[in-house]
Amino acid sequence: MHYLTKTLGLFSALALVTASFAQLPQKLERGGDFSIRIIDGRYVLTGGLGGSGSFRSSALRFEFLPNAGLDWQLRVRDLVNAINSDYMLRWNTTILPNGDIRWDMDATPNECTTLRIGSSDINFKLTRIWGRITLRLSELTCQADPHGRLNRSVTVQMDETGGDQNNYLRLEGYAFCVEQPLFFTEGNVFQLDIRGYGGGLPKSQGNLNNDCVVDDADLLIVLFNFGTSDAANDVNGDGIVDDADLLIVLFNFGLEG
Ligand SMILES: [Ca+2]
Ligand SMILES: [Ca+2]
């Protein structure tokens, strides 16, 4: 009996350790979207077109794709401002054994678009673009998105980890859209410094007061507004606060974002 209790105790201890690793990616997914910014990086272009400089982005918001875990997508132009293409790039997720998130993207647009060099737009056939981002998740106290892009509080911070081997962006194509070796151009982005925010719980999960937990405070808000059409307190956004909203709060009761 004593032995059994000890064994069970060990199992629960292990389960707790596993849970703590799994928890942050799950929190991120429950949030539904995230904000991310490339604080700094370097790019080098070689071949048909040459050049180098800094590579940065403003903070942007992205939603996770429906029923696809932490996968997300963005347009080429959102990733590389200098390229005027709406081609969608999908980032596929791997959660590494240590809890880090790895996003991989590899696309072959084969599109004649433009690439801005200095102040001029040069025709450029983007044949392939690919990259990898590896982020370490850490827990934040519930607070407004420091990037100011998400309209709810966040609980997870993400920072790039693993150096250039695990954080890079590359592209290949042809200057002037002329598919000759002379015009073949390669782009390499490295020394990336990336910061992201996510987690928290959206209103749609029953967190009406934006405090990153579904609890009795949210329940009271639904009860006090029961039967009204107050959009701020309408969990499922169907125009009325009713038993459907109450059920969402009850079903998620105790959930922490
Ligand atoms: Ca709440
Ligand atoms: Ca409702």
Image: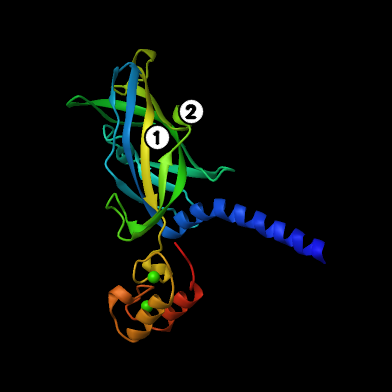
Residue at point 44%, 28% (across, down): 164
In this rendering, the answer to whether 12 lies above or below 218 is above
For the residue with label 1, is its CB less than 8 Å from the closest atom of ligand 2? no
Identify the image quadrant of residue 9.
Answer: bottom right
Q: Residue furthest left?
A: 119
The structure's colour scheme is rainbow
How far across and down, in percent of the image, does residue 177 sit? Answer: 31, 24
| Residue 69 appears in the rendering | no
In this rendering, the answer to whether 120 lies above or below 238 is above
Which residue does the numbered mark 1 point to in the structure image? 109
Residue at point 37%, 84% (across, down): 223
Residue at point 41%, 72% (across, down): 206
SS at mark 2 in the image: helix
Identify the image quadrant of residue 186.
Answer: top left
Q: Quadrant of ligand 1?
A: bottom left
Q: Residue furthest top?
A: 182
Which residue does the numbered mark 2 point to in the structure image? 165
Q: Nearer the viewer, residue 173 or 217?
A: 217
Q: Mark 2 to mark 1: distance in Å?
A: 24 Å
Q: Please, what is the three-letter code of the amino acid marked with disc 2?
A: Gln
How far across and down, in percent of the image, does residue 73 sit? Answer: 40, 46
- Residue 203 as seen in the image, left or right of residue 4: left
Q: Which mark is residue 204?
A: none
| Residue 208 appears in the rendering | yes
Of labels 2 and 1, the one closer to you? 2
Q: Which quadrant is home to the C terminus?
A: bottom left
Q: Which quadrant is home to the N terminus?
A: bottom right
Residue at point 44%, 74% (across, down): 215
How far across and down, in percent of the image, does residue 182 sit? Answer: 35, 12
Q: Nearer the viewer, residue 83 or 131?
A: 131
